[in-house]
Amino acid sequence: MFTPTFEREVLQMRTKEEAQQELREKFGMPKTSDFQAALRNGQVEKAEEWLQYIIDHKDRFPQYHANWDGWVSDRRREIAEAKTNPGQEAIPTRSKEEAKKDLLDQFGFDDSGGFRTCLANGDVERAEKWLSYIEANPNDFPQYLATWSSWLRDRKKELERAKGK
């Protein structure tokens, strides 16, 4: 028979893939992007059940542990937005490939990794302009729309750290 401590240790060793499989079987929504798609499709109750299940079984979902509070807060906000603005989803104005080419042409890099490299190399001004450009035109960057709030919050934190604030 397992002891409670041993069971807890076994659960903590679950992989992201195992956790996603559980969510796939229970809700048909293994990832956060599926949750967001459900909200866009008006399945607010299903999305709420999915989130509550993860909250109730936090130890079973290691992929969210590193940023638990922020992740849960973002999902709750998305649910609230879906309830107050049903059917109001962001619609991309161009493809991911077009967006990446635009960023590369203007800034010399096309993704968050390039943004971080810029910051690490002390080119904070260029990184800040890149982020401001995306923030001013979110629908032009479909690669960031699914996780917009958390993606933007994370980049802003990285920028502030680089500025020493």
Image (spheres, helix red, strand yellow):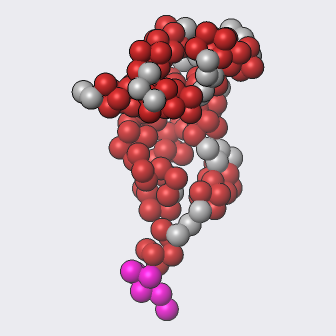
Could you say which is closer to the camera, residue 19 or residue 29?
19
Residue at the image position 48 percent from the left and 68 percent from the top: 12
- Range covered by the magenta-colored residues: 1-6
Examine the image and state in which quarter residue 105 appears.
top right
Asked whether residue 3 is drawn in magenta, I would say: yes
Picture coordinates of residue 94, whole percent (x, y)? 72, 11
Residue at the image position 57 percent from the left and 40 percent from the top: 32
Examine the image and state in which quarter residue 113 appears.
top right
Picture coordinates of residue 20, whole percent (x, y)? 63, 54
Q: Is residue 110 left or right of residue 74?
A: right
Q: Is residue 125 above or below residue 58?
A: above
Could you say which is closer to the camera, residue 120 or residue 98?
120
Could you say which is closer to the camera, residue 121 or residue 1?
121
Residue at the image position 35 percent from the left and 29 percent from the top: 162
Q: Is residue 49 above or below residue 36?
A: below
Where's the C terminus, which quadrant? Answer: top left
